[in-house]
Structure formats: C-alpha cells, structure tokens
Image (tube, helix red, strand yellow):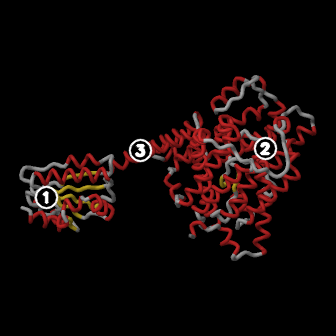
Amino acid sequence: MTNFKPMLISDLRHYSTKQLVQDIIAGIIVAIIALPLSIALAIASGVGPEAGIYTAVIAGIATALLGGSNVQISGPTAAFATIVAGIVSRSGLDGLAMATIIAGILLMVMGLLKLGNLIKFIPYTITTGFTAGIAVTLVIGQLKDFFGVTYSAGEAPIETMEKALAFFSSIGTVNWQAVLVGLVCLVILILWPKIYEKIPASLLAVAAGIIMVKGFGMEVNTIGDLYNVSRGLPAFQMPKFSISGVMVVFPDAITIALLAGIESLLSCVVADGMIQKQHRSNTELMAQGVGNIASALFGGIPATGAIARTAANIKNGGRTPIAGLVHSLVLVFILVVLMPYAAWIPMPAIAAILLSVAYNMCQWRQFVYLVKTSPKSDILVLVLTFVLTVIFDLVIAIEIGLVVACILFMRRMSDETKIESWKYIEAENDPDSLALRHVEKHISVYELSGPLFFAVADQISRIKTKSYTKCVILRMRSVPSVDIDALRMLEQFVKQCNKKGITVVFSHVNAQPLRAMHKSGLYDLVKKENFCLNIDAALVRGKELQ
C-alpha cells in the first residue's frame, strides 16, 4: 500500500529541529507570496477575494497532510481562472461547488485505480498549447481592470473573445490613473526580483498600489469598491445537488479533474528534479481529490499543485510537508486579522499581478522552440490546442487536441508498419550471397515489421500466393504487438490459405503477439508445429510441406 502512503509520515521519521526552522521560514515566505496571488486568482475566477484564501488554506492543509510530495504547495492557480469564471456565469456558485466536488471524487478514483502514471500519455505539445492559451485568456481578461475601462450598462462578457471585443469597443473610457498604477505595479513585478528576492515582488506591488491610490487620492477602483470583503474562518456550505445539475456540470468536473491532475503531477515532477527525490503520484491524486472536495464545502474554488509556489518553497529551504502546513496557518492568521485591509488593493495592481503570472506560465520560448524544431504533425497539435483554448475553451482544446494527436500518431505508426515479400535472386549474381538463404519454389516468405493494429490490418489481405505455393512463412521478429483487428485479418488469411491447401508458418513471434494468438484461438488454428523460433527453422518446416 505504499502507493497511498502520505509523504508526511515518511518525512517525520527523520525530522530534525533544524529542518523545522527551515520549514517554518519557507512556509511564512510562501504564504506571503500566496496572499496576493490567491486574492487575484479568486477575482479573476469571478468569486469573492476571500474564496482564494479559503482555497489556499484548505487545499494546502489537505496536500500537506495527505500528499505524495515532500514540498508541494497547493491552492488556486491561473489555469483554473477562466474555467471557473465560465462555470460561475453558467451555473452559479452552487454549480461550481458541485463541479469541484465531483472533480475531487474523480481525482480520488484516479488515485485508487493507480492512474497517476497515465498523465504522461498526454502529449507535451497539448500541455504546452493549452498552457499558452490559458495565459492569453488570462491577459485578455485583465485588460479591463489594468486600463480602468468601463463597459456599457448591462455588458458582462464571459467568453475570451467577448471580453476582447468588449474591451476594444470601450477603449475610449480608459482611466489613465488606473493605467499609471498598473504600470508602476508591473515594473515592480518585473524589476524587483532582480534586485532583492527575499521580499516578494507581488507584495511590494500591492503596497505601492495602495499608497498611490490612498495617498494621492487617485480615482481608481479597489477591491472594496467592487466586492464585499469579509474576514473570519470559512463556513461549511453543502451545495444543492440534483441529477439535472450534476449532468450540466459533469463535463466541467472532468476538465477540473484532468487539469488538477496534470498540473499537480507536473509540479511534483519539477519539484523532484529540484530536491532529488521521488513523489508518489497516486497518493498525490488522492490528496488533491480530498483538497478539492474540502475546498468546495468551505466556500473555495478548484485547487491544484502550484509550480511557482512549490519552487519558492524549495528555494527558501522547505523540504517536508510541514512547510505547507505553516503556509496555510499563516494564511489563516491573515484571513482572520488582516483581511479587511485587502479592500484597499487597487484593481490595476491585481491585474498587473495576473499579467505577470500569465507571462511566467505561457512558456513562449518553449512554444517557439517547439514550432521551430518539431515535426509538422506535432506543430499542428500544438497550434491547434493553443488556438482552440483561446477561441473556445480548454475542454474543446484538450478533446480535439487529443483526437488529432491520436490520429496523427496512428498515421505515423502505420507508415512504420510494412509487409514485404522476400525477393528471389540468383546467389551467384549477388555480392552478399553468403547472407542469403535458399528458399524452395513452393515457399513464399513475407517480412512483417512494426505494430499490427486496426489502421494497418488491411495490409495483411495484400499478401499474395502463387498457384504452386504450398507454404507461406510470416516472419514476425519485428512485430512488437498486435490488436484484435490484425488477429482477425490473420485468421481470415490462414483460413483462406487452408482452403487452397496452403500451410501458414509463423517465424519468431514475440511475446505479446503470441499471447494474443493463444487467447484468440489463432494459435490452435495454425497448430503448434507451425510456430517456429527463427527463419531457418521455418524454412525447414516449409520444406517438409512440399
């Protein structure tokens, strides 16, 4: 049962006072980093600012106590912002809670079924494409607050393209004071990490924004102008479940579960490389499931492992889940004591933070590198996933991206699968005659290579026999696997040959194809004596059939 053993249990066996001090320091620093980010991501998701902190606290505790990583920090992330905003607009907060709880259950099921390793089957081009697409949607969503634009009465765009059109149609209402605050905050976010890393740039940007707006009386919207900010611990909130409601949000729940699983495990992989340890993927999925369920029940939003916060934890000395617990407890203190002051934060400062997050997550250099160096099929998947994420949504992007990637993969594999007949040549006219084998006239030899699956199964029907053929040898040393379609075609071929009095002999059948032949009954149809270990034995068997 080591697959479901929380890393906290393992780490506490050899815990030291020195490590406790390092974990406490790292936890405090990560909490300070998480505070403005959590508020900003909650607002971008269309919920109240305190919901972001609820999420960071609850998911952070769940991941620390039950997770499969030594250093994972969980909470709201930018990848969910547009998804959550869409769910809230369509189904309200109850719909969001239902979708998040169902997603949490799906994550737990994935962990129980030990599906953690299956995440690696999602192509890198798809994850890069939708990550870049999410970054673009996040940027478009922040243009309104960064420029202080005022939309027309009753105009509340939801989709990314609608937001872009609404922004450009209202460009004449730009608030230059808001632009100034946003630019100052953005400059701080860009330059401060190069000067002094110990104080988080986002916290300094928020402080600068508050000073500018409050100190100079600038007419710029703050969080308090748009939201009711409350302090105190979150209350238990059970959503109203119904069959119709579940059916509506179930596709969103699948998206949340997949994205939470992908992002959390990617974060774990990055962390493993930084601390030279190995995470427990299925345990991590279970913990993320519990965290999302608990977050939804206490007014939070979907959560996942946050790569940036996890990296910050590691860089500041965090090495055990204790740092994650400290991070959550510090946020609880801020939530109870300091939360009312969050109302002072200017909206352009929040927008600047999210623009910075979008830039850091977009991986544009990697995107350009893939476009320059990848095969055309991979470039197609990358660009298609990116465009669909921006124009439509992540669900459509992943679905179509996976379908296209699978089709292109099958095409690539089918190009590698070949069924070729041996050529009959005169040995004395060939310089490589020592490597040639003598084949009787009544024997035909076909070399099969590559996986035999449904996309190439019809190639088997192209095997031709002569009127004098008594034996067909199928050499399968280069066939790693077969599926049921290929087995059906092989069975039909064997039966047709049997009707003509031709015996089919198989040479060097690998393990998987041989097991499949036993299971399907093809082995009994062909008969044991017609399965040979190598081509020489197969030629001897063919000579006996003259």
Of mark 2 and mark 3, the one earlier in the sequence is 2
Q: Which mark is residue 503?
A: 1
Q: Position of residue 532 (x, y in %)?
A: 20, 66
Disc 2: CA contacts within 10 A as few (<14), some (14-19) or many (>=20)? many
Whether residues under marks 2 and 3 lie with C-beta atoms below 8 angstroms apart, the answer is no
Image: 111 above or below 379: below
67 or 362, which is in the foreground? 67
**What amino acid type should be assigned to the residue bearing mark 3?**
Leu
Residue 280 position, x and y percent, is 59, 64
As drawn, the label of residue 342 is none
The residue under the point 62% across, 52% down is 104
Q: Nearer the viewer, residue 199 or 194?
A: 199
Q: Residues within 10 Å of mark 3 (few under 14, many from 20)?
A: some
Of the residues under marks 1 and 3, which one precedes in the sequence? 3
Residue ID at (86%, 42%): 343
Q: What amino acid is labelled 1 in the image? A: Thr
Position of the C terminus by quadrant: bottom left
> Residue 291 appears at what percent x and percent y?
68, 55
- CA distance separating discs 1 and 2: 75 Å
- Quarter occupied by residue 536: bottom left
Disc 3 target residue = 408
Amino acid type indicated by mark 2: Pro
